[in-house]
Image: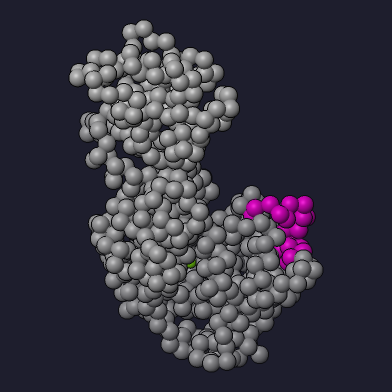
Amino acid sequence: MISSGISSLAVLLIVIFLFREGFSLFSTSPLENKNIIVVNKTNPVSKLNAGQIKAIFDQEITNWKDLGGNNDSIILFTINDISNYFSDEEVGAEFEFLPDKLNALVDSNPTMLAVYQDKYLAKKFSGKIVNVAKNNIPDFIMGKQWFPTAEPAVQLGVAPLILGTLLVSFFAILFALPVGLATAIYMAEVADERLRKILKPVIELLAGIPSVVYGFFGLIVIVPMIHDVFNLPVGETALAGSIVLGIMALPTIITVSEDAIRNTPRSMKEASLALGANKWQTIYRVVIPYSMSGISAAAILGIGRALGETMAVLMVTGNAAVMPKSLLQPVRTIPATIAAELGEAPAGGVHYQALFALGCILFLITMAINIWVQAISTRRKMNK
Amino acid sequence: MNKIETKNLNLYYGTFHALKGITMSVKANTVTALIGPSGCGKSTYLRLFNRMNDLIPGVKIEGDVLLDEKDIYNNKGMRIDELRKKVGMVFQKPNPFPKSIFENVAYGLRVNGMNHASFVEERVETSLKQAALWDEVKDKLKKSAFALSGGQQQRLCIARALAIEPSVLLMDEPASALDPISTAKIEDLIYELKNKYTIIIVTHNMQQAGRVSDKTAFFYLGDLIEYNDTNIIFTNPTDPNTQSYVTGRFG
Ligand SMILES: Nc1ncnc2c1ncn2[C@@H]1O[C@H](COP(=O)(O)OP(=O)(O)OP(=O)(O)O)[C@@H](O)[C@H]1O
Ligand SMILES: [Mg+2]
């Protein structure tokens, strides 16, 4: 009683902490290091978002008209370019003249876009500070670019990660379900007691193997195999992740669906057999329909297992944060991203917060799946 | 000619001797009641005829079981599913499939490869009529069988067994889970069905045995104690055990 209270409290605190950290992302700016973006006061552009800033820096946008301004080329200025405009003496040994020089520079270049830290803002500033859109939920979820350390503006689009996670998990289940179901049927309906006594612990053992071991297995066996079979430059692909995850989800799927199959009342099977159905007809027409909700619960639990899995996927999927287009490309999943990047993200920074927000998304997805399982199993109880 | 016959039949569950040298024969188009105290082997005996006992691990059977004078156990030409098409069974508790009323009745046809739509429809209708259920369900054939009452479910199970046109119908306490009105309906039904089928029914209800059966067999501890015309078993049995069982003074 007390211990369950403590553990629910602990879970609640973890969730609150996760969401507080995650949501603090949406009150910060994508600009790193207190940078600001400054333009000439005559420039009509007064708002930019993270994606546009990146495009400007990548020279994909070179004209103000693409940003809603006049038809003029953008002159991009960052603090590293300062020596192209001013000598060291002009800036001053302690950069004491820098703010005024920067101000003058922007003042005299109507088409310039300058990025510098806010401490270099002149006292008598005569330019215009561009309003940069804060990180926000729609851009975060729908954005396709994940460059959490890009300068000067981080790109926090997690769509590739969400899709990567769902893709890898979906195909994992697609592979695991037929195999798992066949095994479960074999164990529940075909194998004799002796064989079952051997198989059952083996499958439970499979569930207890650490995921790194599965990762190694994937790396040594599956990845080279995919590399050879499909003649790819790299074998680390979504497919490799799906296969490894599928194998890892097997024990869950087998155990849960075997249970459901075993729960089919004897009277149901006897009725079928007494009508002249053979064993396979009985399995296919009575046992499987009867245990369908248990089997779907098994599938969903398997998906849940696959969604949260970190280490093995990290090792075999190649971890490219791009929108997945096929199974034969590298992808990156949410757990793998968090595991790989949290160590190098400075605590409290935008990147760090973004990883927590990713954690929130994963939490929501798994919670939705759990609710789904609950709904299915209550429906199953009601049917009986 | 005997429809069904067992000769010196012994059945063991592992080491437990459940049926002890049973020799008995049943004529076609009769109703035979199997009676006896709980655990005496009535169900076990009944399940011999459609080889349902085969499903239980550790069962050993000695002796002969004949259907239409052909051995059904030691007979390479007799496939179990073929046998079960000829010998239908109705269980103690109604056990419809989680399917529609229509599909429940059609099940036996479908698994035996009879899938032609109009043929299936016709058979479903005749079977439901034979089971005296048609009028109650003809407007809701697509509804789940679970939506029916217990008595209706049991008649559905009878219709399901009749659909594949067996020649023998085994019934293991088919009315024990039902109310008196449903029971009366099932009994009327058994009386009707006698014209086309050979029926063996297990029952704990002496009045029922008296009402529906032509012959009665009294089992006790795995032995067949007495087998005779029903009116003789109930009015003038030879064995004192039979006497006390049918008069309700048993144990
Ligand atoms: N699967 C089994 N394994 C072992 N013993 C069994 C099994 N089924 C039945 N028996 C035993 O065989 C004996 C006969 O059982 P059976 O079910 O045929 O009795 P019954 O006459 O139908 O009883 P009831 O009237 O209670 O249905 C009983 O002693 C029972 O315990
Ligand atoms: Mg019984």
The answer to which of A168 and B245 lies nearer the viewer is A168
Picture coordinates of residue A168, whole percent (x, y): 43, 54
Instruction: Confirm whether the magenta stretch covers residue B95.
Output: no
Q: Residue B142: say if magenta.
A: yes
Q: In the rendered image, is residue A14 in sight?
A: yes
Kindly give the residue lying farthest to the top in the view shown.
A124
Q: How many marks?
A: 0
Q: Position of residue A252 (x, y in %)?
A: 37, 56
Which residue range is magenta in the image? Answer: B124-145
Q: Residue at x 77, y 68 (%)?
A: B117
Query: On the rendered structure, is A74 left or right of B221?
Result: right
Question: Observer-nearest residue: A333 or B81?
Answer: A333
State the image coordinates of residue A281 (x, y, percent, origin top left).
56, 72
The one of A236 and B191 positioned closer to us in this rendering = A236
Give the quarter of the image for residue B123.
bottom right
Vertical order, A380 against A259 (above or below): above
B57 relative position to B181: left or right:
left
Query: Residue placed farthest to the left in the image?
Result: A93
Where is residue B54 drawn, in percent x and y? 46, 78
Residue B14 drawn above or below residue A105:
below
